[in-house]
Amino acid sequence: MIAPSKAEVTRLLRAWSPQDHERLLELLYAELRRTAGRLMARERAEHTLQPTALVHEAWLRLVDQDSIAWTDRAHFLGIAARCMRQVLVDHARGRAAAKRGGGWGQVTLDEDLLAGENHVLELLALDDALAKLARLDERAAQVAERRIFGGMTIEEIAHDLQVSRRTVDGDWATARLWLTRELAAG
């Protein structure tokens, strides 16, 4: 499959008209599906949400975003990461409510996040920790969200947030350390 033209994706995002949504999904679906697959690979084996369903749920939330002035592919992928996070958290909350806390979804964060330690963390605890981090350092939380939930590279995040790669590296180091401590304490 040929990679979509960044210029075409950007043009469609800036136009953001309902008649372009199908073409945009066609161009970005494989990338969104890979991201969802990575996220779901970290989930428990009996998880009832599949990567395809995660993409479709996130897509429904994305196409409902009339107030966002999309700038480019990286901006879209950053928002898509947030939508996938919200879908997973909503799903976990629904299971927790149904089972009184016994069925909270767990996610294994990659070794990159925890500097070599292999921890299994509850998705809801991660979501809460990211929310706390956002109150202390919004950009570091955005970087973490894009890395963990969006699978975005440092370069993509830097472009999306309009900061330098060095700034993103620093924010990512801060976020990893802060999240590791916060989740270990919880």
Image (spheres, rainbow, N blue to C red):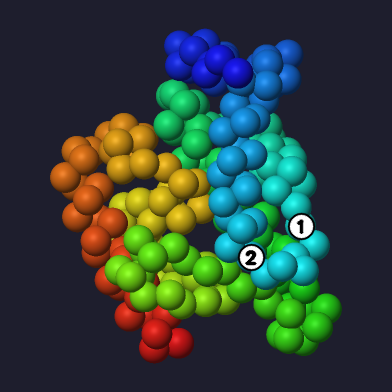
- Circle 1 Cα neighbour tier, 10 Å, few/some/many (<14 / 14–19 / ≥20): some
Q: Seen from this angle, which residue lies furthest left?
A: 166
User: Measuring 57% from the left and 76% from the top, which residue is drawn there?
Assistant: 122
Residue 131 visible from this viewpoint: no
Image-quadrant location for residue 175? bottom left
Residue 55 in the figure: left or right of residue 76: right
What is the secondary structure assignment of the residue under circle 1? loop
The disc labelled 2 sits on which kind of residue? Glu
Q: Which residue is mark 1?
A: 49
Q: Position of residue 60 (x, y in %)?
A: 73, 38
Residue 149 in the figure: left or right of residue 153: right
User: Measuring 69% from the left and 42% from the top, which residue is drawn there?
Assistant: 55
Number of marks: 2
Q: Position of residue 76 (x, y in %)?
A: 50, 32
In this view, the residue in front, 184 or 111, is: 111
Residues at circles 1 and 2 in contact by the CB criterion of under 8 Å: yes
User: Measuring 72% from the left and 67% from the top, which residue is drawn there?
Assistant: 45
Q: Position of residue 141 (x, y in %)?
A: 37, 58
Cα–Cα span, label 1 and label 2? 9 Å
Q: Is residue 41 above or below residue 159?
A: below
Q: Is residue 141 above or below residue 127?
A: above
User: Measuring 61% from the left and 58% from the top, which residue is drawn there?
Assistant: 41
What is the secondary structure assignment of the residue under circle 2? loop
Mark 1 or 2 closer to N-term? 2
Q: Is residue 15 above or below residue 136?
A: above
The disc labelled 1 sits on which kind of residue? Leu
What mark, if any, has residue 43 been given in the picture? 2
Q: Position of residue 156 (x, y in %)?
A: 36, 35
Image-quadrant location for residue 162? top left
Q: Is residue 40 above or below residue 73?
A: below
